[in-house]
Amino acid sequence: MLVRAHSFAIDRGSAGHVDVELDLRAGLPTLAVIGLGGGSARELRERVQAAVLNSGFAFPRRRLTVNVAPATRKGGPEFDLAVACCLLASTGALNPARLQRIGLCAELGLGGELRSPSGAGTVAEAAALAGLAGLVVARTDLQATRLSGVIPVAGLGTLREVVALLGASPRVIERAFRRGTLAAAG
């Protein structure tokens, strides 16, 4: 099964759109990451696996291949949330169609907390240029990303909150983006 999400490479005060793809198939359990430098790929694998498991979700015991395109030698933490959401969509924990028009940009803590990658304030314009309908960032980045006013932004605190938002009705999602948080949408 192939799942795609949108994220952003942040470098020197600017952000560029990046496609994150995840392929889930039968085979020996492994998580391979291509399109990132070796150290960044290893760290991303460890953060995503720990965050998914510590958030109470199942981690598939199958062959997983993640591709970040275009390939980048810098960064990595800003792709954590997109990779985790692709993984969860491939296992049925969320609907893959919900990832088609939403940008995802946050580092994951090992417990599933969303953290701010350096320079996240520049992501909103890149998301708008990519034609996305909304952007999910760490709660701490909400103000910086909303200042541009070019795209609706939701600032959330955990991976579980992101899954709850993406699993909600379109009306709840719209309210969350308008108000900037899932808690205010309820």
Image (cartoon, rainbow, N blue to C red):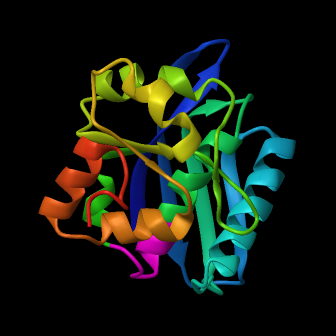
Comparing 94 with 18, the one in front is 94
* Residue 101 seen anywhere in this rendered image of the structure: no
In which quarter of the view is residue 146 placed? top left
Q: Where is residue 11 in the image (x, y as percent from the top left)?
A: 65, 19
Quarter holding the C terminus is bottom left
**Is residue 161 found left or right of 107 in the rendered image?**
left
Residue plotted at (61% across, 33% down): 71
Q: Residue at the right extreme? A: 39
Q: Where is residue 138 in the image (x, y as percent from the top left)?
A: 55, 46
Comparing 20 with 34, the one in front is 20
91 inside magenta stretch: yes
Q: Where is residue 173 in the image (x, y as percent from the top left)?
A: 23, 58
Residue plotted at (62% across, 40% down): 78
**Is residue 60 found left or right of 175 in the rendered image?**
right
Q: Where is residue 35 in the image (x, y as percent from the top left)?
A: 65, 41
**Is residue 16 found left or right of 43 in the rendered image?**
left
Instruction: Please give the count of numbered marks on the rendered protein.
Output: 0
Residue plotted at (66% across, 30% down): 72
Q: Residue at the front extreme? A: 184
* Residue 125 seen anywhere in this rendered image of the structure: yes
23 inside magenta stretch: no
Residue plotted at (68% across, 80% down): 53
- The region drawn magenta spans 86-94
In which quarter of the view is residue 6 placed? top left
**Residue 26 higher or lower than 115, as above or below:** below
